[in-house]
Image (spheres, rainbow, N blue to C red):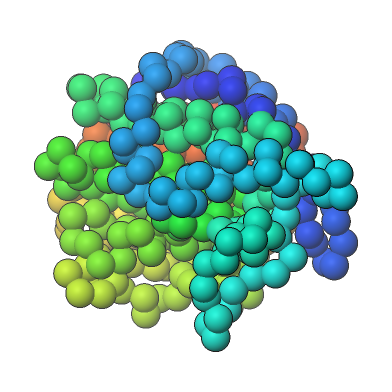
Amino acid sequence: MIAIYDERQALHEPLTRLAGGQLVSSPEKPERLEMLLAGLKAAGVPVIKPAEHGDEAIRAIHDADYLDFLEHGFAAWRKSPANGPELRASVHPNVYMNRKPLDLLGRAGYFQADASCVLVEGTWQAVRASANTAIDAMSRVLAGENRAYALCRPPGHHAYGDKAGGFCYLNNTAIAANLASQLGCRVAIIDVDVHHGNGTQTIFYDRADVLTVSVHGDPAFLYPYYAGYEDERGKGAGLGFNRNFPVPLFSDSGVYLAALAVGCDAVTAFAPDIVIIALGLDAAVSDPFACMGVNIEGFERMGAMLGGLRRKTLVVQEGGYPSGALPLLLTSFLRGLTDAD
């Protein structure tokens, strides 16, 4: 197994997020990278810098106007001395009004689904490097690598084709999956992040070439709240190719892995050529968000279950936030994944 990592991902340094009506320190910070790198080192996984790829795979998933906002929005924002160090929307569209305005703040509200996905000085460089990391890792799997891990940060699975959300800007998992699908591969995504991958679901919701499976905390009580329910099964050609397995908040390893086992059955029935694991480590009992109870042994068992699918595999890093256990969680998961061989 190899890992792909680009140090430019550290350039995105958000200062705050809105929580409980207050601006507090963002947990999606560059130090996540160092912790995850420590986990890779402990697992004995070699880390490789990605080759530079073009934007074609990104543009196949994301709206051109949205990409322009990500690349140039912050510079436009800082032209006014009255504006602060983060571009964060203060107004958002809703089901009754959803036009795209010309004003920068209005466009920020249109393109930022929530208050957690601010733009700062290095955001575009970092999210572009994160997507390029996933592209490079998938390219290596397509070229014959059996397993690869893309150390992507910022994460991506909450990003829609034209909206950022939940710390996510470019949907790394979807970009990688679409790249493989366009080359004729059957692709299954299995997302184990504690928060539902709403962006990924939406991108593939009417497609039958990519199966999307998600095990996550019940969205009736957990972000993203408005998607991730069991009855969301896809539409049109995609009907039946989206599967959600929400579990009660604070569930232990046994409950979470029982749901994953059913998700693995769905993947096996689909018979994919490639499996993409959207790896969130935030279902851990030690995670700062503290909404699930999976322990370190549970993550090793999770890796073993997914390795047992016996498919070429790309692991794309999603959530999992700074704690003393974060490196060990990654090490344990990868140990389970590779020991399954």
Question: Could you tell whether 25 is left or right of 331 in the image?
Answer: right
Relative to the observer, which residue lies in front, 325 or 51? 51
Percent position of residue 293, x then y? 63, 57
Q: Is residue 301 visible?
A: no
| Res 316 → quadrant | top left
Q: Residue at x 55, y 81 (%)?
A: 97
Relative to the observer, which residue lies in front, 21 or 282? 21
Q: How many marks?
A: 0
Q: Residue furthest left?
A: 184
Question: Could you tell whether 150 is left or right of 252 in the image?
Answer: left
Q: Is residue 223 above or below residue 191?
A: below
Percent position of residue 61, x then y? 35, 49
Q: Where does the N terminus fall, quadrant-wise?
A: top left
Q: Where does the C terminus fall, quadrant-wise?
A: top left
Q: Residue at x 74, y 65 (%)?
A: 90
| Res 266 → quadrant | bottom left
Q: Residue at x 57, y 66 (%)?
A: 101
Q: Residue furthest bottom?
A: 96
Q: Is residue 184 visible?
A: yes
Percent position of residue 251, x then y? 59, 64
Relative to the observer, which residue lies in front, 307 or 226? 226
Q: Residue at x 46, y 70 (%)?
A: 228
Question: Could you tell whether 147 is left or right of 42 in the image?
Answer: left
Question: Could you tell whether 307 is left or right of 171 in the image?
Answer: left
